[in-house]
Image: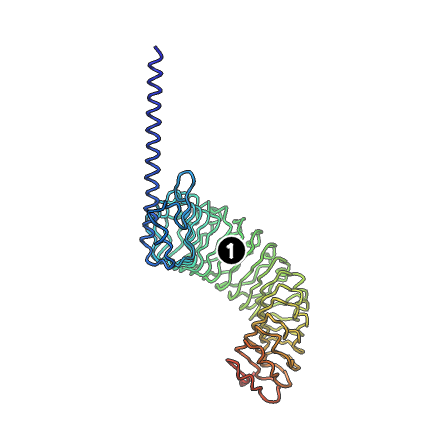
């Protein structure tokens, strides 16, 4: 009596399996076709493909999973990554891209895409990385993008996007990196963004038209490693609470309308490598505590009204320095005597201050130095002879000081890469060395207002630009 019933169950199960298999196969076929249609729509929206890669490779004769820049999942054969960076592609993004429902990475950076970002990108619920930097996208950032539940990287920098940053972007709890720099974005940044972005590591929104005050609540972004707010219209003071971001490696606040001092609390950022607050209207003393951040590579505070001095043992304190931009402040005191120990230094800009004393010969130890600008100070003594054998130097500006003595007779050969030499407005004497012309790349030579004697070497006529005199000091 039980046998017929068992047969019925088995028969039903077989039918179900067959139906399910057919349904799954049909479903995968349909969704795969959807992926292919989305890719072909993108191809159709590209008006210029200089390398002809899409024209030749994206063909129906080949499975789309084998198309250039397309990566499919091994199981479902669905597009999981679309990467076409740096191909000079010109066109727009079709709304069909929102149908790539398995997509986790969209990388179209460094192309010539333009037009608006399609709101349909918000349908990419599995998307983790949206990398569209360095294109020509216009319009606003679609509010819908802020609803992508798994997005970790939002890279839209280097475009022409406008309007405010949607608040939804600052509520994406999965976001780790936000790069919106170099657009035309405006408005303010919410003070509570760190309460909604607990995983945030990078916030780079420089080169926009953002305004408002820099919120002290940024200290709650405990994982933050890069904070870029430069070249905007932020006002107010630098919050001392930023000193609590102990994982911060790069801090860019320059070219804003700030006021007040640099908080000494920033010296707590013991892993900081790049610090830039140039052209921001800052006053007060440059905190000596900042010279204790031994990890610093770039120290940029130029074009402010900062006072104070530079420690004599600058390079002992900051052995990793590569760029020092203290230009145009009110700094004084002696030139740092251990400068020769900053062996990684590439650029040293201390001009337009009131530094005094001599420049030590040890400056010649800087084998990587390309730019040395010390103009408009009160430096004295002879110019260190070793400077004229620094083969990496491209720019040497020592003008408007009190340097004395002669220029070396063999000044040229040791400066094969020098493009600018400015020593005017000093107390240099003797003859102008004919060997200067051996610095064959020099395009700008400025020797005016010194005590030189003799004739002007004819070989200087080979230089592109020559300035030997100006009225007044």
Assess disc 1: are there few (<14), some (14-19) or many (≥20) residues with their C-alpha within 10 Å of its C-alpha: many
The image quarter in which residue 261 lies: bottom right
| Residue occupying image coordinates x 57% and y 51% | 247
| Residue occupying image coordinates x 48% and y 51% | 177
Which quarter of the figure is the N terminus placed in? top left
Instruction: Identify residue for label 1.
Output: 227
- Mark yes or no: residue 102 visible: yes
Q: Nearer the viewer, residue 367 or 397?
A: 367
Q: Does dot 1 land on a helix, a strand or a loop?
A: strand
Query: How many numbered discs, if any?
Result: 1
Specify whether 59 is left or right of 320. left
Asked if residue 353 is positioned above or below residue 130 in the image, the reply reads below
| Residue 424, percent from left and from top | 58, 81
- Mark yes or no: residue 186 visible: no
| Residue 122, percent from left and from top | 37, 46
Specify whether 58 is left or right of 151. left
Q: Nearer the viewer, residue 435 or 292?
A: 435
View extreme (top): residue: 1
Q: Nearer the viewer, residue 395 or 164?
A: 395
Which quarter of the figure is the C terminus placed in? bottom right
Q: Nearer the viewer, residue 288 or 57?
A: 57
Q: What's the colour scheme?
A: rainbow
Asked if residue 192 is positioned above or below residue 320 in the image, the reply reads above
| Residue 472, percent from left and from top | 55, 85
View extreme (front): residue: 61
Specify whether 209 is left or right of 466. left
């Amino acid at each position: 009596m039980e046998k017929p019933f068992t047969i019925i169950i088995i028969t039903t199960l077989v039918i179900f399996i067959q139906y399910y298999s057919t349904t799954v196969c049909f479903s995968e076929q349909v969704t795969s076709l959807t992926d292919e249609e989305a890719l072909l729509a993108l191809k159709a929206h590209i008006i210029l493909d200089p390398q002809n890669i899409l024209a030749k490779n994206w063909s129906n004769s080949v499975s789309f999973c084998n198309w250039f820049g397309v990566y499919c999942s091994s199981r479902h054969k669905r597009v999981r990554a679309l990467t076409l960076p740096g191909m000079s592609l010109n066109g727009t993004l079709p709304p069909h891209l929102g149908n790539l429902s398995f997509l986790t990475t969209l990388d179209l950076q460094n192309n010539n895409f333009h037009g608006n970002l399609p709101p349909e990108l918000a349908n990419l619920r599995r998307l983790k990385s949206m990398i569209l930097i360095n294109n020509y996208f216009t319009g606003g950032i679609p509010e819908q993008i802020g609803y992508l539940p798994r997005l970790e990287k939002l890279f839209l920098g280097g475009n022409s996007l406008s309007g405010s940053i949607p608040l939804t972007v600052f509520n994406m709890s999965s976001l780790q990196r936000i790069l919106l720099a170099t657009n035309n974005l405006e408005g303010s940044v919410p003070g509570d963004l760190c309460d909604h972005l607990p995983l945030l590591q990078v916030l780079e929104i420089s080169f926009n038209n953002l305004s408002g005050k820099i919120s002290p609540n940024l200290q709650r972004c405990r994982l933050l490693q890069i904070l870029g707010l430069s070249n905007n219209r932020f006002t107010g003071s630098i919050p001392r609470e930023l000193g609590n971001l102990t994982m911060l490696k790069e801090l860019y606040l320059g070219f804003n309308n700030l006021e007040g001092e640099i908080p000494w609390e920033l010296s707590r950022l013991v892993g900081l490598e790049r610090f830039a607050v140039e052209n921001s209207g800052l006053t007060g003393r440059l905190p000596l505590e900042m010279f204790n951040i031994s990890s610093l590579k770039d120290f940029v505070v130029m074009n402010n009204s900062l006072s104070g001095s530079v420690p004599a043992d600058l390079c002992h304190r900051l052995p990793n320095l590569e760029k020092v931009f203290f230009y145009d402040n009110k700094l004084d005191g002696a030139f740092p005597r251990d400068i020769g120990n900053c062996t990684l230094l590439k650029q040293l800009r201390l001009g337009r201050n009131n530094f005094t004393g001599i420049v030590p010969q040890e400056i010649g130890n800087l084998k990587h130095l390309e730019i040395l600008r010390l103009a408009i100070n009160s430096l004295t003594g002879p110019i260190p002879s070793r400077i004229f054998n620094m083969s990496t130097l491209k720019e040497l500006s020592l003008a408007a000081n009190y340097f004395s003595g002669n220029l070396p007779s063999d000044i040229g050969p040791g400066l094969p890469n020098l493009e600018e030499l400015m020593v005017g407005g000093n107390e240099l004497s003797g003859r102008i060395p004919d060997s200067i012309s051996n610095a064959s790349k020099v395009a700008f030579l400025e020797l005016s207002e010194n005590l030189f004697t003799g004739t002007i070497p004819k070989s200087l006529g080979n230089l592109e630009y020559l300035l030997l005199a100006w009225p007044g000091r």
